[in-house]
Image (cartoon, rainbow, N blue to C red):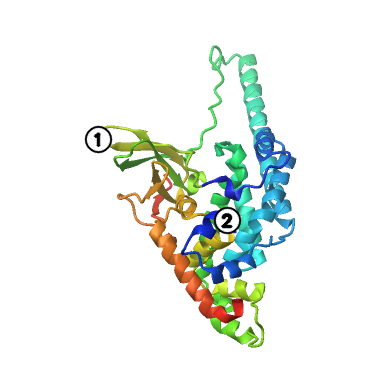
Amino acid sequence: MTARVSLPEVSPSDAELVQRVRQGNLDAYGLLMVRYRLRFGRYAFHLLGNESDAEDALQDAFFLAYRSIDQCREPARFGAWLFRILVNRCRTMAVQRGRDAARRVPFEAADIVGVAHPAESVVTREEIHRALGALVPEQREAFLLKYVEEMTYEEMVELTGAKESALKMRVKRACERLRRLLGEHRAS
Amino acid sequence: MRAEHRKDPEHDPVAERFAARLRDPVPLTDRVERAVLRRLEAEAAERRDDRSRWRKFVAAMALAAGIAIVFGLGVLVGRRSAVPAPTDAEVRSVEFVLRTAADSAVALVGDFNDWDPSATPLRPAADSLWSVVVPLRPGRYRYTFIVDGTRWYRDPSAPRALEDDFGTPTSVITVAHR
């Protein structure tokens, strides 16, 4: 994966902060968390569908990353390393949540149709977010990584371990389903 | 939009417009950091308590040894400390083996190393066999192998993880209690 999921050069750099964390400086870790909460909160929120689960996933990812900070071989790419941990944590939570049928109700397509306004020419962010929730988790993950996080398929293969052909199919199906759910004409 | 995407003929312009509306940061609150710092501080306090208990235990043993010498038992005379090194009896050594004609490297990633490809490299053995021994506490772990940094392989000798819904080849191992 490239440094796409890392932040632009800022001071102190991630490498400096990771070094301080390894010396036992918790404040430095707090700074890293603030930095990446803002950056990665978006992915966790759209994948899991709500702020509470997104915060839980981020907490777990930050906690796991701190405990294995010595295993971060490239501190300058802390963000990419953390993102991998977060993606795996979100997957686990999405699967667990998928077993709880009751929690899928807010994402049913019928709801989206119900809130649609025929006269409205542009879909809202909220409607898109809800439509995302109607996708199966692996399609939602692929769409978010490709279109929202703007990763290449090569980066997605490295991050997820899935084959490129499978990822392309998931993205394609996700796009088709979003178009159907939201109405192609409303996005133009 | 990223330059690669602009050139990609498969890039869906409608989906791109949907995605553009999702790219704003989601302002999750600082509850996240505060909760993590609380967990880390609690864990550090627990470690300090453990060390303190350990020091007290060592001091008590030293005192007991001193008393024994004073009373002429002589049992401990000439020996080093009888205090055993701390060990975790629950940790078990698990060997992971993969047969593959890798060109350069095989890595093990899983729940036990936060799926970090640089954390647990396998060492080459004879006949395209690669292996590594990992200390694991009892529990259930998902894992997979990454060959030459790009190809992911499920362990052919282990069950497939039920959570393998995302197409990532994932195996599962359960380490039992002794």
Say whether residue A101 is visible: no
Residue denoted by label 2: B2
**Identity of the residue drawn at 56% across and 20% down:** B81
A11 vs B82, nearest the viewer: A11
Q: Which SS class for mark 2?
A: loop
Residue A161 location in percent, x, y? 43, 53
Determine whether A136 is above or below B98 in the image.
Answer: below
Instruction: Tell me, for residue A151, which label it has, or none.
Output: none
Q: Residues within 10 Å of mark 2 (few under 14, many from 20)?
A: few
B57 vs A143, nearest the viewer: A143
Sequence-earlier tag: 1 or 2? 2
Determine whether A95 is above or below A117 in the image.
Answer: above
- Alpha-carbon distance for marks 1 and 2? 44 Å
Left or right position of A187 against B175? right
Residue denoted by label 1: B127
What type is the residue that disc 1 sits on?
Answer: Asp
Q: Chain of mark 1?
A: B
Q: Which SS class for mark 1?
A: loop
**Identity of the residue drawn at 58% across and 36% down:** A70
B163 vs A136, nearest the viewer: A136
Residue A61 location in percent, x, y? 60, 51
**Identity of the residue drawn at 49% across and 38% down:** B119
